[in-house]
Amino acid sequence: MIFLSILLVLALVQWWGSGAPLQKDGAFYRYLGWLDQQRFSRRPKAHLLMAVLLPTLVLWVLYAWVVSQVSAILGFLIAVPVLLYSLGRGDFSSQVRAYLDASERGDSVSAAQHLADLQGVAAEDGDPEDWPELHRQALKAIAYGGFERMFAVIFWFVVLGPAGALLYRLSVLYRQAHASRAAQRWLWLLEWPAVRLMGLTWAMAGDFERCFFRCQRDLFNRQQSSAALLYDQMLGALGAQSDQPGSAEVDSDMIRAGQPLFSRSLLLWVCVLALITLLA
């Protein structure tokens, strides 16, 4: 059912452009508001556990009971909407295309706004003509954005089922609402194994030698953020000559090549999951 759920969700995303029809976060934010009023709200770790783990545990118990006691088909009907809800927000492909269109026109002001949309933040004041920096920031946003939107969600869906996908998405939403040290560290821990697997996948789907070198070098790196490591690994997969992310030259062609890299990586893992399903 895991493999069929992923296939159906990917088909629906291709049709809709995103999982937006099922991505309603109002209930979760109201729940966070209620938690903020409770006595333990001043303890970040307790607040995080109640906000993220309690809904996940409820789903895990419900799903396990339905699959074991009622019907696997009903479990499938639970898994698909949960996975759709857990995918990233917005039409990422359209945002990337908008940035590239602005780049081709030489419209740096519009490009900076589209970059802010990719990053999920307000546009910052800066040198609007600094195209190398805009391209570096855009590729970094694409590297983490594509990972956070789909790969990390599917990773935890495969590992823990629908509860794993929900756990990751609620952790992302929680960090956006409460940017505490505990929330950032928790999300970093969730992403740690998926980031390493993403890098290995990019190595197989892109420039193996350069990307795999970075994967080996940073395998046990505990200092860099997920976004920084993914950016470095994507540079390697795209064949960047420099081993230092800050000095690597990034142009619009590299940005344009970033999304096909994700597509090839996703296709690779769909094939792997299909093989595992056939052999199981």
Image (tube, rainbow, N blue to C red):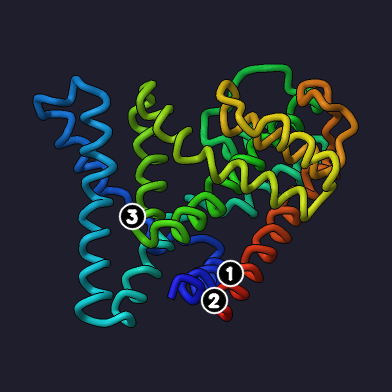
Q: Earlier in the sequence, mark 1 or mark 3?
A: 3
Which quarter of the picture shows residue 186?
top left
Q: Identify the amino acid type marked 2.
A: Thr
Question: Are dots 3 and 2 in contact, CB under 8 Å?
Answer: no
Q: Mark 1 = which residue? A: 273
Question: Are dots 1 and 3 in contact, CB under 8 Å?
Answer: no
Identify the residue at the far front of this view.
280
| Residue at image point 21% right, 64% down | 62
- Viewer-closest of 32 and 131: 32
Identify the residue at the far right of this view.
241
Q: Mark 3 = which residue? A: 24
Q: Mark 2 = which residue? A: 277
With 107 as the anchor, is 158 left or right in this view? left
Q: Is residue 270 above or below residue 42?
A: below
Spot occupied by residue 274 in the image (x, y as percentages of width and height): 60, 75
Q: Residues within 10 Å of mark 2 (few under 14, many from 20)?
A: few
Q: Is residue 11 above or below residue 99?
A: below
| Residue at image point 77% right, 43% down | 255
Which quarter of the picture shows residue 159?
bottom left
Spot occupied by residue 232 in the image (x, y as percentages of width and height): 72, 33
Question: Are dots 1 and 2 in contact, CB under 8 Å?
Answer: yes
Spot occupied by residue 110 in the image (x, y as percentages of width and height): 69, 35
* Disc marking residue 238: none
- Is residue 5 at least partly visible in the picture? yes
Q: Identify the amino acid type marked 3.
A: Lys
Q: Is residue 71 above or below residue 22?
A: below
Helix, strand or loop for disc 2:
helix
Helix, strand or loop for disc 3:
loop
Q: Residues within 10 Å of mark 3 (few under 14, many from 20)?
A: few
With 131 as the anchor, is 119 left or right in this view? left
